[in-house]
Image: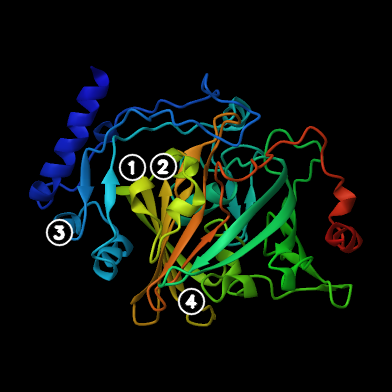
Amino acid sequence: MNMMIRKINILLIILILPIYVLADQTFSIKSIGERVPITSPLNEFNPELDSYPDPFSSDQIIFTINSKNYLKFKETLLTPGQVKMFKAYPKTFKMNIYPSRRSCAVPPEVLELTKENALLIDKGEGVDGTVGSIPFPYPIEALHHVWNHILRYRGTEIQSSSPFFIVNPDGTRTYGEGKSIAKNFWNPFTKDKNKDLQGMLMTRVTHPPRLADASTLVIESLNAFQTPRRAWVYNPGTRRVRRAPDINYDYKPSASQGLTTVDQVDGFNGAKDRYNWSNHGTKLKLVPYNAYMFHETPLEEVLTAFHVNQDYLRYELVNVNVVEANLKKDKRHSIPKRMMYFDVDSHNMLIEETFDEENTLMAYREFPLINFYDQPMCLSIHSATYDFATRRYQLQSVRSADLPKVKWRLNKPHDIKMFTPDGLKRFAR
């Protein structure tokens, strides 16, 4: 009965909202229901498999937005990037709207540490707070939302491998893959306590063959002003490790083919000093959410031309915190303006839009998430970057039932001595 009432409420909001938008643009959290976090695995979950069964598989599509009706929602529930997707791909782009399911959760240890806001220091480049907490449970400033995203819980001793794809307008693809290990320090479970570091990451390219064994080490501090990012790369041709101070800001790795910058990995990362940040408040938007169906679908079925197969994506009405970043006049970056949409519940970036100097949309990015309920934590199953100039898109950090699960909390911690230039050389081999 409650489920039926919730479906009716969401449908009424979607159908009636455009009519009354001029009268009232403020809606309460009750419009999308109360939070019902999933804090433990489903009964059908098998830790030996790479699958995450859908908790909401019985939900039905309650509305579909397509090129014929999207203008009704242009000024209310859609973002500018979504509107441009409808304009760019009128025959294929659509958004299937499902009931809102506020299922995101974090380990109870994270909540126990979360009491009050941390402090922003050094003009927002650093955070001083309780390690492992949600740094800003009561966000006010734009950078509160950015830091909540960066420091959201996402494991501690990590081991993963995930492919990336670049899909051309004719459907042909470039495929790549790599392996990585990481230590996150901002969480309740790290044994190697280090209040000054955010994390350490090592990656090794395994495909394509011409780039195989090219490896990178990144050490990220909690204060880019006091301790800037340190990075090294290993070149398999020379078998040497060298410092790589350029791996930050708008550096574009060769594997991205110019579609994304280093500071767009995981939505946003790194120093924030090149932008002026502004908070646009909390808004209701239709965003990719609870993307279990996409996660469980074979990759061959979801990788279609122009954009992923929209039949398998689920969109929900979600409260998001909207943040704008504008390039400072005396700074340089290939992305002059960015709009970011952060989930109120999980603090994940769900959408990013990038603009050029003329305020023209360059790219629309989506980060569909699921609750990895065996942790529990909510993270994206990929980042999709849709470039309007080339009509190509990039799918990065892909997680799928087709792929081995990411190990988020290894029983045996990584040796911290591995995260050194010598360790990088051993990792690369």
Looking at the rendered structure, the kind of residue marked 3 is: Lys
Looking at the rendered structure, the kind of residue marked 2 is: Val
Residue 68 has which mark? 3
Residue 344 has which mark? 2
Determine the residue positioned at 53% across, 33% down: 52
Q: Measure the alpha-carbon separation of dots 4 and 3.
A: 39 Å
Quick one: SS at disc 3?
Answer: loop
Decide: marks 3, 1 in contact (CB < 8 A)?
no
Determine the residue positioned at 73% across, 61% down: 206
Q: Measure the alpha-carbon separation of dots 4 and 2.
A: 27 Å
**Would you identify the image quadrant in which residue 109 lies?**
top right
Q: Residues within 10 Å of mark 4 (few under 14, many from 20)?
A: some
- Residue under label 4, please give it: 328
Nearer the N terminus, badge 3 or badge 1? Answer: 3
Which quarter of the rendering shows the N terminus? top left
Colouring of the image: rainbow
Q: Measure the alpha-carbon separation of dots 3 and 1.
A: 23 Å
Residue 283 in view in this figure: no
Which one is in front, 310 or 26?
310
In this view, 281 is above or below 305 = above
